Amino acid sequence: MNVPAAWYLVVATLLFGIGAFGLLTRRSALIMFMCLELMLNAVNLTFVTFSRTMSDIAGQASVFFVMVVAAAEVTVGLGIVVAVFRRRSSTSVDDLTELKG
Amino acid sequence: MIATAIYAPDFVVFCASTILIIVGAVGVISFKNPVHAALSLIMTLFGVAVAFVAQSADFLAAVQIIVYAGAIVVLFLFVIMFLGVGYGSKVDVEPLVGQRGFAIAGVVITIGGLIALMASSHWVTGPTSVTGKLAHGQANVKQLGTAVFTTYLYAFEATSLLLVIAVVGAVLLARRERATTRETTDEASNEELDV
């Protein structure tokens, strides 16, 4: 008998929670992107778990597309980080306060 | 569902992947140095790849290692080295009063709510696939390829467009503004040629 799907779902939930906590508390834009990757991986893990339990390939196809979109997102996001760093020599999101009233 | 007999090697693999995932994730959010955080991220991604193999998603495990650990984390490290971001990120400083407490409360409520919701709904419900049973090993790659190139063909084509847009956008964003300097260098090189 294989490991129950419930265990993998709990691990994925914990991973999502850790990623969300890091995204809410860390101030460096680079670390926030890494936390975003953690959350995406948690969702990928649930997709694969449901795919195995339902014996359906659609879940794995979804993971494939999530990976492509994550790669595109990181590319553009790091480009923005480089552009912001060039302008103000910092990657901390607290320094971006132009719109503060 | 919990109280079924579990094959021992599967349990060992599950525990190993869980340790890799959780330890790596905690490392990402707690290390001050971004390089160490990126290396912890590799650990988590590797743990997720182990979990993929354990659930017979072989192709995705390979892609996870190649694309995530091999390309995305290297891109992260490249940007960290390129910008020279050192210990600038302050872990202990709280810019908003009580932000960390609110974050912990929100995350605990979310995790507890999700687990309670799944436990009360018997974790996984719904009909299993009738048409295509999930294959293992090499057949898994073939099955996933067939699904991506037939059922999800339009989505696949859309991702190719998305990747092109992302690459062009990244080049445009990260490019240094040197329209004026280029003209001057061109003139300078022309003068050199004239001489």
Image (cartoon, coloured by chain):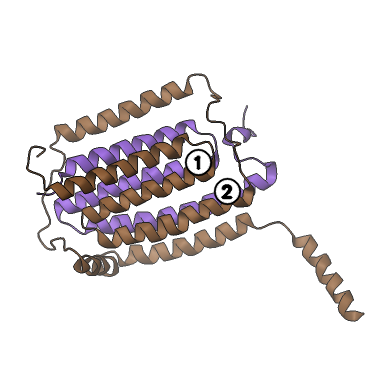
Image check: B166 left or right of A63?
right
The local crowd at label 1, few if under 14, some if 14 to 19, many if 20 or more residues have their Cα within 10 Å, is many
Which chain did the image draw in brown?
B
Q: Is residue A61 above or below residue A19?
A: below
Q: Residue at x 31, y 30 (%)?
A: B110
Q: Residue at x 44, y 40 (%)?
A: B28
Q: On screen, B154 above or below B20?
A: below
Q: Where does the image place residue B117, in percent across and percent down from the top left? A: 20, 32
Q: Residue farthest to the right?
A: B195
For mark 2, does the 10 Å Cα neighbourhood hold few (<14), some (14 to 19), or many (20 or more) residues? some
> What residue sits right under mark 1 in the picture?
A31
Whether the residues at callouts 1 and 2 have beta carbons within 8 Å, the answer is no
Does residue B176 sit above or below A88 in this rendering?
below
Identify which amino acid the numbered label 1 is placed on. Ile
Which colour is chain A painted?
purple
**Residue B12 x %, y %:** 20, 46
Give the number of marks.
2
Q: Residue B76's x, y, as percent?
A: 52, 51
Left or right, B28 with reference to B188: left
* Residue at mark 2: B80
- Label 2 marks which chain's residue? B
